[in-house]
Amino acid sequence: MSRTVAEQLVETLAQAGVQRIYGLVGDSLNPVTDALHRSGKIEWIHVRHEETAAFAAGAEAQLTGKLAVCAGSCGPGNLHLINGLFDAHRSMAPVLAIASHIPTSEIGSGYFQETHPDQLFRECSHYCELVTNPSQMPHVLQSAMQHAVSKRGVSVIVLPGDVAAMRATADAPGRGIVTGVPLVRPTDADLARLADLLNRASKVTLFCGRGCAGAHDELLALADKLKAPIGYAFRGKEWVEFDNPYAVGMSGLLGWGAAYKAMHDCDALLLLGTDFPYKSFMPTTPKIAQVDFRGERLGRRSKLDLGLCGDVRETIKALLPLVEQKTNRKFLDAMLEQHAATQRKLRADVDAGRTHRPIHPGYVVAMLDELAGPEAIFTADTGMCCVWAARQLGTAKGRRLLGSFVHGSMANAMPQAIGAQAANPGRQVIALSGDGGFAMLMGDVLTLGQHDLPVKILLFNNHSLGMVQLEMEVAGMSPFGCNLKNPNFAALAQAAGLFGVRVEEPAQVRPALKQAMAYPGPALVDIVTDPNALAMPPRATIQQAAGFALAMTKLAFGGKSDDVLDTVAANWRELL
Ligand SMILES: Cc1ncc(C[n+]2csc(CCOP(=O)(O)OP(=O)(O)O)c2C)c(N)n1
């Protein structure tokens, strides 16, 4: 008996190695989920909000490097995918979204739930096609999968329910997907130019991003030859920071350490696989060279004296023999000393956190860092969680750290943890969630129980949209619309069938984390943290410090002098 288009879709995805699809059922998607159910070859991860499905698929794809799939029903169902798909696409995660659609005969009639997904998803995908005829399906599916994997990002198949239920008329290609990635390295002439630039400079700094994945040994060899400090962007942290005697921390709004100074005080700055977005943190005086395997990214964030298109690892391997060994460590040692001083300050903050009330979130993450295993996968919500993760979480080799680091969406951490755990059943998966972010997609805490996913959620319950509160304060505004009237999240978690514990005292932090980590199922630790634990960027400008002072003055004149005292007490260290 011939197959339906939906059966052909499921069979082809299974052949391509897809193990699960995250999604939520709905009329037009029914032929697909029914085919999935009958085939038994692909697991259906039933989420409560489609945005979670897209974030989860994005996380799976980022962790495995393989194609991950999500699905939503027509109109509002697949529309809910969109924010997570933007995140996956911008994170270069190979994700295929199946957006089911209204009946073909109704397209253009203003039908119930009608949208135009083929237009809606165009901006967040490399490939987005509507299937109106069964004979299209094999090549559209093949192209969609191949685009997602080869171009690294999202593909969308818009599949009307009636077409999904039709008989397949063309054979699936059956050749699977080609996952090989070419090695790209610059020309010999370009490499010689880069070597010349580096050899002429007496103080070189390397600044590294996500493109340095898998290039740890080569980076260290280059830093050793150049006696160069290594700074990194947040996306580079997990690949660069561990076991690295040249590491000087991060730059940018989350930054700490000596990276900013190292980038500004050098003669030559080499940007490696980074698309670090904040121009205001980039220096203008040193010579700047950049290596990126995506040529279109060269020079878009800073001045560019030399741009090379190539994979970071391959480029460094080819560059190393051309680079002269430097022996003068003065610049490197000065930067390392400054970095060590920042680390001492962070450690002192952690020590102070042992007794600080309300609980300092940085202290919580420092405890987490001590207790989590070497293979732990962390996900961090957009907001202040990123600050504490950047500063206090050690990304030892083997650990992974995901966030919405390019798209910057709230509510990413728990959904990403769902995908991380589903794809890595044996690994410790820990979500660092903001109270604002968590509440946004809170319904999917139920997915943890439904699918028996033993994710641990650390909820930073500061009763505030803290990051935005900080933004307002540094701009001299008094914080408006930032306060959150929260429930007892631990009690909520318990009601949802999770292990839930609430922590209000610093002495309870460690035992509660241990308890949650030892618990065999999903757990939530609701930690009431200091809403005033703000953090200034590594290079707070005079205006920012002045803005902060102005905001404090406004609060004081608004009769909130207690708040002012709390905030200043919590932050005086940052301002010094
Ligand atoms: C979907 C979305 N809405 C709004 C924002 C703007 N925004 C960025 S961080 C933030 C506050 C996050 O608050 P919370 O999750 O409580 O974390 P906190 O910063 O307090 O740790 C907001 C509103 C965003 N990035 N994404």
Image: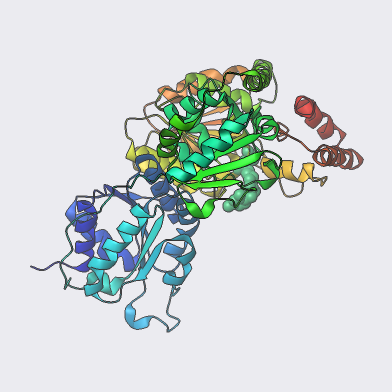
Residue 405: give x, y in percent of width and height.
Answer: 54, 44
Query: In the visual, does 512 lie left or right of 102?
Result: right
Query: Residue furthest toward the right?
Result: 557
Picture quarter with the N terminus: bottom left
Q: Is residue 271 left or right of residue 562?
A: left
Q: Using the image as rendered, state which of residue 194 and residue 211 is in the foreground.
A: 194
Residue 54 x, y percent position in the rendering: 42, 53
Q: Nearer the viewer, residue 456 or 193?
A: 193
Q: How many numbered callouts?
A: 0
Instruction: Please tell me in which quadrant of the rendered image residue 250 appears.
Output: top right
Question: Which residue is more in the foreground, 408 or 207?
Answer: 207
Snapshot colouring:
rainbow
Work out whether residue 208 can be spotted: no
**Which residue corresponds to the image point at 52% horizontal and 23% vertical from the top-left?**
325
* Up-down relation of residue 61 to residue 97 (above or below): above
Residue 56 appears in the picture as rendered: yes
Residue 58 drawn above or below residue 271: below
In the rendered image, residue 207, in percent from the top left (x then y), is placed at 57, 35
Please indicate whether residue 533 sits to the left or right of residue 247 in the image: right
The percent position of residue 425, horizontal first and vertical second, equals 32, 34
Vertically, is 83 above or below 209? below
Q: 8 left or right of 114?
A: left
| Quadrant including the C terminus | top right
